[in-house]
Amino acid sequence: MKRFLILSILIIFLTVSCAGPNKVKVGWTKPDFRQDQFENDRKECIDSIYQNLNSNAFGKALEECLEKKSYEFKSVEEIEKPPEKPPSTGEIVLGVALFIVLSPLILAYGVLLVGSAP
């Protein structure tokens, strides 16, 4: 029975770890980005690059060609991240008020702990 439980837990663990989302971390973008236009531009760049280059040189040449076509290379988090809004005045006032009220309480508690030590 123990072997069955251990084996089933192992299979579940492997299944879950392999089935997680595989999110792409990078991407190309530009102000008027359209997927079909990007694919056409990328194909043009690939066709214009000398095909016998090693993979690093080919990748670098492809990046340079896409950058010439005004594409920018950004991470997906950077693309999808909403702009951060500054804290509101109410949040700032609340934070200052909590600091003013809690600081003396924490200090008094510390004094009580030190004063009660043997």
Image (cartoon, rainbow, N blue to C red):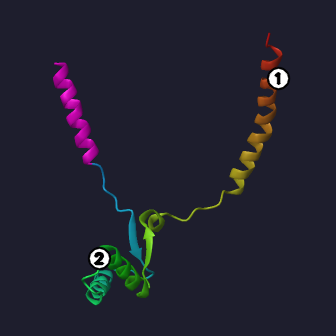
Quadrant where the C terminus sits is top right
Q: Nearer the viewer, mark 2 or mark 1?
A: 2
Q: What label does residue 21 carry, if any?
A: none
Element type at marker 2? loop
- Which residue was labeled with disc 1? 111
Give me the residue at 23% from left, 31% from top. 9
Give me the residue at 51% from left, 64% from top. 82
The magenta-colored residue range is 1-19
Q: At which x and y percent is residue 18?
A: 25, 47
Please check the rendered image and state whether residue 117 is part of the magenta-colored stretch, yes or no.
no
Measured in 3D between alpha carbons, the distance from the residue under mark 2 to the one under mark 1, in whole angstroms, is: 70 Å
- Which residue was labeled with disc 2? 54
Lateral position of residue 64 relative to residue 86, left or right: left
- Image height of 65 relative to 85, above or below: below
Please name the amino acid that badge 1 sits on.
Val
Please check the rendered image and state whether residue 2 is part of the magenta-colored stretch, yes or no.
yes
Q: Overall secondary structure of the magenta stretch?
A: helix
Dots 2 and 1: beta carbons under 8 Å?
no
* Residue 17 figure quarter: top left
Q: At which x and y percent is residue 73?
A: 43, 74
Lateral position of residue 32 relative to residue 47, left or right: right
Residue farthest toward the top in the current orientation of the protein: 118
* Residue 83 figure quarter: bottom right
- Of residues 112 and 68, the one nearer the viewer is 68
Give me the residue at 42% from left, 65% from top. 76
Element type at marker 1? helix
- Of residues 9 and 81, the one nearer the viewer is 9
Lateral position of residue 4 relative to residue 37, left or right: left
Give me the residue at 65% from left, 60% from top. 86
